Image: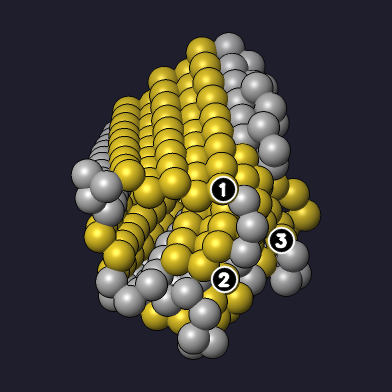
Amino acid sequence: GVGIFVAGGTVTLHNCNIYSNQAKASFGGGVYINDGTVTLNNCDIYSNTAINGGGGNIKSGKVTLNNCNIRNNVNQGGASNWGGGVYISGSSTSVTFTSCNIHNNKAYGFGGGVIIAGGTLTLNSCDIYSNIATNYGGSVYITGSSTSVTFQSCQIYSNTASYSGAGVSINHGTVTVNNCGIYSNNAGSGGGVHVSAGTVTLNSCDIYSNTASNDVGSNIYVQSGSVCAFPSAPTFSGV
């Protein structure tokens, strides 16, 4: 981590700007959290680069971000690298985003905005938009059999993935999406939501106006896994 490295302890940051850092051969250009309890309030994390996790890498610990912007970050790895905005890993990691904007990040690989490969992630009232992945998961890419992710009242829109899942791409894990809008995303297939494995629950979501250039699941593409949509009523237009 070039900008801020946290190896343990308790750290709270208020009203900070973390920008223009570059981890040329490692993880977490802006922020690298290896362990500890970390809270960021009203912070702007932007224009950082790394091999994985351009904006930040959260490897372990309990991390909370409130009213933060994560924007214009990029990973500079190859086609299989992870996380333009934030890369989350580690089975004991717990991360919560509340009222954050995650936008205009780019992954050369997976997870333009956020990738989680282990642990627990909760996103409350977040806007995730205009992110790009050259592989899967323009907005968010989820993998790892023990991974747990909850989206609550989020708006996920105008993201792009070259292959699948511009809105959300799920490859293992348990994912719950409550009262969210997923719209105007574009991918090769599964423009809104792509599920290749895992257990996914959609509650009262609006999923519409997404596109798939390969004409496979413009809004939702399920290759495998378990998907349950509860009718208080998810809206699917042109699935």
Residue 24 visible somewhere in the drawing: yes
Question: What's the amino acid at mark 1?
Answer: Ser
Question: What's the amino acid at mark 2?
Answer: Ser
| Residue 138 on image: x %, y % | 50, 65
Q: Mark 3 and 2 residues: CB-CB less than 8 Å, in contact?
A: no
Q: Which mark is residue 81?
A: 3
Q: Is residue 129 above or below residue 116?
A: below
Q: Mark 3 and 1 residues: CB-CB less than 8 Å, in contact?
A: no
Residue 104 visible somewhere in the drawing: no
Q: Residues within 10 Å of mark 3 (few under 14, many from 20)?
A: some
**Residue located at (61% from left, 26% from top):** 93
| Residue 113 on image: x %, y % | 48, 56
Q: Nearer the viewer, residue 237 or 112?
A: 237
| Residue annotated with mark 2 | 164
Q: Is residue 181 above or below residue 108?
A: above
**Residue located at (63% from left, 71% from top):** 135
Choose top left, top right, bottom left or bottom right for residue 109: bottom right
> Is residue 95 shown left or right of residue 125?
right
Q: Nearer the viewer, residue 214 or 46?
A: 214
The first of marks 3 and 1 along the sequence is 3
Foreground tag (2 vs 1): 1
Q: Nearer the viewer, residue 234 or 130?
A: 234
**Residue located at (57% from left, 53% from top):** 170
Question: What's the amino acid at mark 3?
Answer: Asn
Pick the quarter of the image with the N terminus: top right
